[in-house]
Image (cartoon, grey):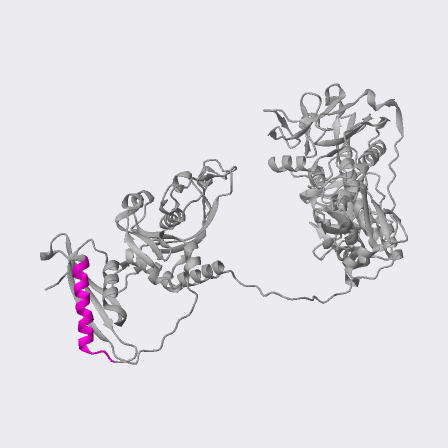
């Protein structure tokens, strides 16, 4: 909201209070002032002049030599290049020594041999935003109204000797979307009275009801609609003072009728609209909701397709305005308009907001309706505008107001006690001080000896509905700086991460340190992609959004890997082939086809590796990633969480994964076995479909990790006694997994076995198609003494025997 300081002075005497001081008081009172703009950008010694004659320059086709009376006692000779300069005009004249914006000084000069004793100015040269001027004044020199007095300083004529306060209003302070609202606020902060403008109307003998009929057909969306009928208006330019005030508020003047409606809207905060009465069939006005398939052309000449929730002003049949948003082209006031139907109404804010947002038509009018207008100002604003039209457009205002009221607004009655005010604010205010504050706010009240106040809040302050709102008003007027500070007392609880939060933070740190990049993808995906990689979400149904952005983002995801494949394809298309990605996010699962309860939200960790582990160098070739890189990432995760011995990797067949390069992650605890994830290569067919190279992915549930992670830090001393290493190579069925093999070795070797490591696997040759040779290194050590060869040989023999019994393994020769 832009507030002219000079205009505000008409409603409250600000003598002795500068614009900057007022801005400071308003800000300290709770309404932030973004800044104070000086409308005079550096103009001095510029006055109104009268062009008495114009002749062509003898040596320049595009220049004119003008004689100008500037009230200086003698005519000035000024050379002017503007095409629109004519004799008989009143214009701004910069005299010798004048200054213009940009520190430009006017000096005596000769232009093509002809002396020029000043300069005739355009609006832009005076620092005025010419986009806010009527179209006819945007080019060439600025032509002033004929009744402007010669010699008057231009700052007074154009209202640029003014300052504008720009208020940054919060949504609850809609009362300050008007000059009167700001005046009440300034009056409360300064303790000075507010003077309301006169809105008396001299009615003609004819009755408005003979010309206009009003009906509200959508009473939930319009609580009051009032209209006046004004005859015989003459549409033309507005007086200069009115234009100045609209320009200061950032509104472009159009014509006297439209400008008056905008002026009163700024003054009262009540939007108005003027219809050409002769274009309203039968003078009928009906407020109703739009019908299915209905459309209309608005004042910006755009055809708008309407929907049934949009509120319209109609002539009983066709729409003539979008209620509270914009008028219709079929009822527009033009230069030929002679009769006016002037509208003032109270439309429901939510309805106006929905219409303006859907049609991308946000106006000064819709902003005020959205935040709520004061029902008590509808009629005064209507009368004020009608009176101005009678004065400045020559209209005759017919007798009476035609209106329908569905529901009248009432002042709110709110009670608050002095004890509660002081308890909330930590103050020791007296009854007299609180009474003074309520009086300055313009609130009527009654009080008793117990310190109870019954306050009648005027309807202009719709933001005050409860006792705490009144307490806030007392705090604002008393001064926030005057409220005593109170030390905070009581026990404090230090913040801490929950166990799941700490685990997720540790996982992110570990994976990024391992060279993976974290990504965050949409929680919504395409229905087809929701059906990929469902091993951990078997039995879950995709959950459709009620209002999706598009079909590509229409269901909640049931897995993270499909999103990672999308990201991989996106990067591949941009020549980024080497990828190491991970995501920690939520999936959403339900077994219902029609939701009757909230879905389960589960945390998961997923990763993707593709391209090269190490890029090619002069001394080595590129090393492509493989299954064991993905498995290694998982092993690092389980080691970090102290779960290495709890998770097994078992060969598995999973849709969309390579049948020979896939493993299920199985958690084995005292409570049983449970699959918590998978790791493998994306199926070649899917890789081809997504245009990917060999790509390896993993995904696992985080809930089991939260439950079984071991946060204890275990330390053991460095070994004092030597170890004995023994290797063993056995031939066995190639379907036997290395994990099962090492598990049996640990079981047979007992507590003396420190570590076991597979270091070679061989297939082919004379072994046969269904056999493989596995070489394993075993390290034996006793923590408190040196082992003998006999002890190690005994354990090693037990290992060979166990492998033979369990797998039919034979020593490789």
Instruction: Tell me where residue 799 sits by quadrant.
Output: bottom left
Decide which of 666, 469 is in the foreground and name it.
Answer: 666
Compared across the picture, whether 695 is left or right of 246 comes to: left
| Region rendered in magenta | 786-806
The x and y percentages for residue 387 are 85, 33
Looking at the image, which is closer to me, 244 or 403?
403
Is 396 situated above or below 600? above
**Residue 226: image x %, image y %?**
79, 29
Going by the picture, which residue comes out furthest to the top?
A: 282
Q: In the displayed structure, does residue 683 sit left or right of residue 47?
A: left
How many marks the image carries: the answer is 0
Q: Residue at x 26, y 68 (%)?
A: 750
Can residue 311 be seen from the camera position used here?
yes
Residue drawn at 72 percent across, 22 percent down: 279
Does residue 789 belong to the magenta stretch?
yes
**Depicted 512 relative to depicted 564: above or below:** below
Is-magenta flag for residue 156?
no
The correct choice, above or below, for 730 with respect to 233 in the image is: below
Measured from the top left, where is residue 59 in percent x and y?
A: 68, 45
Indicate whether 488 appears above or below 653.
Answer: below
Q: Which of 746 and 435 is in front in this view?
A: 746
Secondary structure of the magenta portion, mostly?
A: helix
Question: Picture coordinates of residue 60 (x, y %)?
Answer: 67, 44
Residue sitting nearer the eye, 484 or 786: 786
Q: Look at the image and tell me whether residue 626 can be seen.
A: no
Q: In which quarter of the image is the C terminus?
A: bottom left
Q: Quadrant of residue 366?
A: top right
């Amino acid at each position: 909201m832009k507030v002219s300081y000079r205009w505000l002075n008409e409603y409250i005497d600000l003598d002795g209070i500068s614009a900057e001081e007022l801005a400071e008081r308003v800000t300290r009172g709770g309404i932030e002032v973004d800044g104070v703009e000086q409308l005079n950008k550096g103009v001095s010694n510029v006055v109104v002049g009268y062009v008495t004659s114009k002749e062509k320059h003898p040596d320049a086709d595009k220049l004119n030599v003008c004689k100008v009376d500037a009230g200086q006692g003698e005519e000035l000779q000024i050379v002017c290049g503007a095409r629109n300069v004519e004799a008989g005009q009143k214009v701004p004249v910069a005299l010798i020594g004048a200054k213009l914006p940009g520190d430009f000084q006017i000096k005596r000069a000769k232009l093509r041999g002809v002396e020029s004793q000043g300069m005739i100015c355009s609006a832009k040269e005076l620092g005025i935003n010419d986009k806010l001027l009527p179209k006819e004044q945007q080019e060439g020199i600025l032509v002033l109204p004929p009744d402007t007095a010669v010699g008057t300083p231009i700052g007074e004529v154009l209202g640029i000797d003014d300052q504008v306060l720009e208020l940054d209003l919060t949504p609850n302070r809609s009362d300050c979307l008007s000059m009167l609202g700001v005046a009440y606020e300034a009056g409360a902060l300064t303790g000075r009275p507010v003077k309301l403008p006169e809105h008396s109307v001299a009615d003609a003998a004819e009755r408005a009801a003979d010309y206009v009929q009003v009906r509200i057909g959508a009473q939930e969306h319009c609580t009051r609609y009032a209209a006046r009928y004004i005859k015989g208006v003459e549409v033309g330019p507005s007086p200069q003072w009115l234009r100045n005030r609209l320009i200061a508020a950032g509104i472009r003047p159009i014509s006297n009728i439209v400008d008056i409606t905008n002026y009163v809207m700024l003054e009262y905060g009540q939007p108005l609209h003027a219809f050409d009465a002769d274009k309203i069939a039968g003078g009928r006005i009906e407020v109703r909701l739009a019908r299915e398939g209905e459309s209309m052309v608005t004042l910006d000449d755009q055809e708008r397709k309407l929907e049934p929730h949009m509120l319209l002003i109609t002539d009983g049949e066709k729409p003539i305005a979008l209620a509270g948003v914009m008028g219709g082209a079929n009822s527009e006031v033009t230069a030929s308009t002679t009769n006016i139907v002037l509208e003032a109404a109270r439309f429901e804010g939510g309805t106006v907001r929905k219409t303006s947002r859907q049609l991308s038509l946000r106006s000064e009018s819709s902003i005020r309706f959205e935040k709520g207008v004061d029902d008590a100002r509808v009629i005064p604003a209507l009368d004020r505008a009608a009176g101005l039209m009678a004065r400045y457009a020559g209209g005759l205002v017919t007798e009476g107001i035609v209106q329908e009221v569905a529901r009248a607004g009432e002042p709110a009655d709110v009670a608050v006690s002095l004890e509660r005010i002081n308890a909330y604010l930590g103050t020791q205010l007296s009854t007299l001080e609180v009474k003074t504050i309520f009086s300055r706010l313009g609130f009527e009240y009654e009080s008793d000896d117990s310190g109870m106040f019954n306050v009648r809040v005027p309807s202009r302050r719709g933001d005050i509905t409860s006792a705490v709102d009144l307490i806030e008003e007392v705090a604002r007027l008393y001064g926030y700086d005057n409220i005593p500070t109170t030390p905070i007392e009581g026990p404090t609880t230090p913040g801490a991460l929950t166990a799941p939060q700490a685990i997720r933070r540790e996982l992110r740190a570990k994976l990024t340190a391992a060279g993976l990049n974290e990504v965050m993808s949409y929680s919504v995906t395409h229905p087809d992609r929701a059906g990929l990689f469902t091993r951990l979400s078997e039995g879950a149904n995709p959950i459709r959004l009620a209002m999706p952005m598009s079909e590509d983002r229409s269901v909640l995801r049931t897995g993270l890997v499909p999103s990672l494949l999308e990201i991989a394809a996106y990067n591949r298309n941009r020549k980024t082939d080497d990828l190491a990605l991970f995501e920690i996010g939520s999936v959403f699962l339900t077994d219902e086809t029609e939701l009757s309860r909230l879905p389960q939200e589960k945390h998961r960790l997923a990763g993707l590796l593709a391209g090269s582990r190490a890029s090619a160098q002069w001394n080595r070739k590129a090393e492509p990633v493989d299954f064991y890189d993905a498995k290694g990432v998982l092993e690092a995760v389980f080691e970090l969480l102290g779960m290495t011995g709890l998770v097994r990797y078992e060969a598995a067949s999973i849709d969309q994964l390579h049948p020979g390069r896939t493993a299920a992650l199985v958690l084995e605890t005292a409570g049983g076995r449970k699959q918590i994830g998978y790791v493998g290569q994306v199926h070649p067919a899917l890789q081809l479909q997504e245009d990917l190279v060999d790509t390896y992915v993993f995904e696992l549930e985080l809930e089991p990790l939260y439950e079984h992670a071991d946060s204890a830090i275990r330390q053991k001393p460095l070994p004092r006694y030597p170890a004995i290493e023994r290797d063993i190579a056995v031939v066995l069925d190639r379907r036997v997994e290395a994990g099962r093999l090492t598990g049996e070795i640990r079981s047979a070797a007992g507590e003396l076995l420190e570590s076991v490591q597979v270091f070679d696997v061989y297939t082919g040759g004379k072994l046969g198609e269904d056999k493989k040779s596995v070489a394993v290194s075993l390290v034996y050590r006793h923590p408190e003494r040196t082992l003998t060869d006999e002890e190690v040989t005994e354990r090693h023999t037990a290992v060979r025997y166990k492998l033979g019994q369990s797998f039919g393994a034979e020593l490789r020769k």
